Image: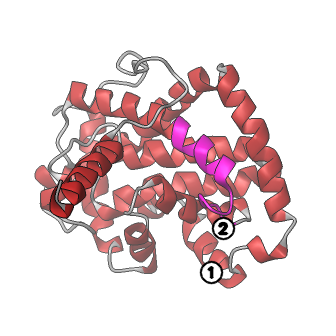
Amino acid sequence: MTLRIVLGLLAIGGAAIAAAPVPGYLNGVFDLTTIVPPAPVKGDIRYAADRKMFKATRAMLDTPRGRLATDDVPSSVIAVEKDFSCAAGVAISPDATPATHRLLAAANADTARANNAAKDHWKRLRPFLIDKGPTCESKEELAKSYDYPSGHATRGWTFGLILSEAEPDRAHAILVRARAYGESRIVCGAHNMSAIEAGRTGASATMQAIRATAAYQADLAVARRELAAARANPANAPDAASCSAEAALATPSVLAAVRK
């Protein structure tokens, strides 16, 4: 067997591994379609509110809040762990906090699968396909998937619920960041306001089922101890100045700012 063939087989094997679904805590996909409200349609009050919010927030892209929203675009588990490190008071990563990383990745697999099934059920178009306006990322890429519920908001709220349970003394800062992470998608023009709300609802519902599993509770206990130990080491603390600047941008709700 030639070296080229060996390398080719390794590449195929690596791709297969990369494509393999991440195991979660639930058997099957949690059905959100009768829990989350239906996606708004033309003529609904929520539909009109979504259009108004999209138009009103386009001016926010070229502001510090818009830059935070752009920074929030990468949505891998590792990227979102970094986004939550300031709120958690400790750098979260596969290397620094491996047990916490496994917990977040497994629960995220469940909430993401449930969310994606709901997206495919309602097939709602993203806001920039209804009204013209700039977005903070490629419209061509965004248009490949649907709007409702928001996957980013689902992931952010999943992380917020788990981390606030693991670090109850940091719960306020963590949940503020989770709310702001979802609202970043409104600022970006990637999702409608209702999609963010639906993402949070869906994540909360799925997490209730996840919390009922013994495996989740066991992993949570390990993560709690790991995070406490990591926070006890000052070397693991995120940069204070950067965290202060992030909190100043994340704390005010985008929705409240638009209503003024």
- Provide residue 142's location: percent of width, then percent of height: 20, 54
Q: What range of the chain is rendered magenta? A: 91-107
What residue sits right under mark 1 in the picture? Answer: 242
Amino acid on which the number 2 mark rests in the picture: Cys
Amino acid on which the number 1 mark rests in the picture: Ser
Q: Residues within 10 Å of mark 1 (few under 14, many from 20)?
A: few
* Label 2 close to label 1 by CB (< 8 Å): yes
Residue drawn 63% across the image and 41% down it: 161
Q: Residues within 10 Å of mark 2 (few under 14, many from 20)?
A: many
Residue closest to the far right: 232
Residue 151 found in image quarter? top left
What residue sits right under mark 2 in the picture? Answer: 86
The answer to if 102 sits in the magenta stretch is yes
**Callout 1 secondary element:** helix
Residue 167, numbered label: none
- Precedes in sequence: disc 2 or disc 1: 2
Residue 29 found in image quarter? top left
The answer to if 29 sits in the magenta stretch is no
- Provide residue 195's location: percent of width, then percent of height: 35, 41
Q: Is residue 260 left or right of residue 140?
A: right
Residue drawn 28% across the image and 53% down it: 10
Residue 117 found in image quarter? top left
**Does any portion of residue 25 appear in the rendered image?**
yes
